[in-house]
Image (cartoon, rainbow, N blue to C red):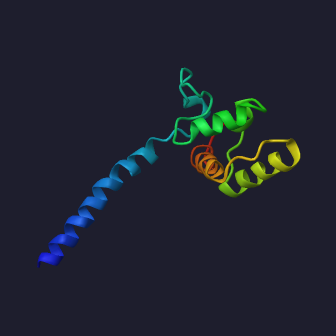
């Protein structure tokens, strides 16, 4: 019985921790028109990794080039390869690239309406 209660508490704790994440995903902005104009990184939508994407992209082109997207992670990954290999983009550190890809796929992914 003690083991069962311990497992039940662990499951409940995991559920409580997951709830804000699920709510946050539902609150995610999916339309350019809904990005607040006073947002520091406008026109990019708020989200984890926005600053890496902002500073990584603004060095070469308008952020509207990014928000015109709406691609899968795979396509964003290919676009980063193309920009590095053919367009002279500085190759981001691997961990920064992962942050950028996570952001792009999550916040400017296939359901994005730019």
**Hey, which residue is sitting farthest front in the picture?**
93
Q: In this orientation, which residue lies closer to the viewer: 91 or 68? A: 91
Against 27, is 105 above or below? below
Residue drawn at 71 percent across, 36 percent down: 57
Q: Quadrant of the C terminus?
A: top right
Q: In this orientation, which residue lies closer to the viewer: 35 or 91? A: 91
Q: In this orientation, which residue lies closer to the viewer: 22 or 57? A: 57
**Hey, which residue is sitting farthest left in the picture?**
1
The mark total stands at 0
Q: Is residue 63 left or right of residue 13?
A: right
In the rendered image, residue 37, in percent from the top left (x then y), is placed at 57, 22
In the rendered image, residue 33, in percent from the top left (x then y), is placed at 59, 29
Q: Is residue 77 left or right of residue 5?
A: right
Q: Is residue 50 left or right of residue 92?
A: left
Residue drawn at 32 percent across, 54 percent down: 17
Against 83, is 46 above or below? above
Residue drawn at 40 percent across, 51 percent down: 22
**Hey, which residue is sitting farthest top in the picture?**
38
In the rendered image, residue 9, in percent from the top left (x then y), is placed at 20, 65
Q: Is residue 89 left or right of residue 30?
A: right
Q: Quadrant for residue 12, please give it.
A: bottom left
In the rendered image, residue 67, in percent from the top left (x then y), is placed at 68, 36
Residue drawn at 63 percent across, 46 percent down: 100
Q: Quadrant of the N terminus?
A: bottom left
Q: Quadrant for residue 10, please give it.
A: bottom left
């Amino acid at each position: 019985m003690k083991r069962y209660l311990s497992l039940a508490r662990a499951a409940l704790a995991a559920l409580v921790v997951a709830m804000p994440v699920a709510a946050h995903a539902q609150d995610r902005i999916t339309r350019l028109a809904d990005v607040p104009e006073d947002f520091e990184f406008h026109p990019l939508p708020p989200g984890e990794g926005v600053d890496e994407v902002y500073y990584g992209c603004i060095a070469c082109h308008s952020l509207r080039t990014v928000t015109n997207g709406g691609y899968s992670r795979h396509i964003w990954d290919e676009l980063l390869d193309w920009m590095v290999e053919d367009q002279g983009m500085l190759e981001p550190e691997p961990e920064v690239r992962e942050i950028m890809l996570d952001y792009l796929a999550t916040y400017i992914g296939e359901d994005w309406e730019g």
